[in-house]
């Protein structure tokens, strides 16, 4: 991520240009799954299927909004939103890919 005030023409170092892979990190003391992003060692030639979804890095057709809306019982959910959405997407026939 970039710090507030980063100039628009900033050229990031090579380590920040590599996409990240989202993966499971641990279950916290409340048994919530914590996911993390770690940079890839090198860019992949093509996207790979993944189990995890990221709310701040999600690209798809707009069909996703009508086919898999956010759970109306969890509108204020922040911690746990991404694993929940990954399960909802998978069970509704959507595949998740990492760059």
Image: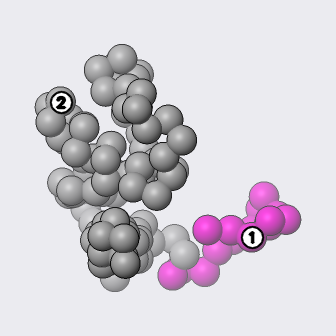
- Residue at left 85%, top 65%? 5
Q: Is residue 21 visible in this depiction of the protein?
A: no
Question: In this rendering, would 13 be left or right of 78?
Answer: right
Q: Earlier in the sequence, mark 1 or mark 2?
A: 1
Q: Which mark is residue 92?
A: 2
Label 1: which secondary element:
loop
The answer to whether residue 67 is above or below residue 83 is above
Q: Is residue 85 visible in this depiction of the protein?
A: yes
Using a 10 Å C-alpha cutoff, classify the residue at mark 1 as few (fewer than 14 neighbours), some (14 to 19) or many (20 or more): few
Can you tell which quarter of the image residue 9 is in?
bottom right
| Image position, residue 63 (x, y; %) | 34, 19
- Residue numbers of the magenta segment: 1-15
Q: How many marks?
A: 2
Separation (CA) of disc 1 from disc 2: 36 Å
Question: In this rendering, would 88 be left or right of 56?
Answer: left
Using a 10 Å C-alpha cutoff, classify the residue at mark 2 as few (fewer than 14 neighbours), some (14 to 19) or many (20 or more): few
| Image position, residue 35 (x, y; %) | 36, 68
Q: Nearer the viewer, residue 16 or 26?
A: 26
The residue that mark 1 highlights is 3
The answer to whether residue 97 is above or below residue 3 is above
């Amino acid at each position: 991520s970039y710090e507030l005030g980063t100039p628009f023409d900033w050229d990031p170092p090579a380590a920040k240009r590599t996409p990240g892979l989202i993966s499971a990190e641990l279950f916290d003391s409340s048994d919530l799954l914590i996911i993390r992003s770690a940079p890839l060692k090198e860019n992949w030639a093509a996207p790979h299927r993944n189990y995890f979804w990221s709310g701040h890095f999600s690209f798809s057709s707009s069909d996703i909004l009508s086919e898999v809306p956010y759970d109306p019982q969890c509108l204020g959910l922040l911690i746990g939103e991404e694993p929940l959405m990954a399960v909802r997407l998978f069970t509704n026939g959507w595949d998740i890919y990492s760059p």
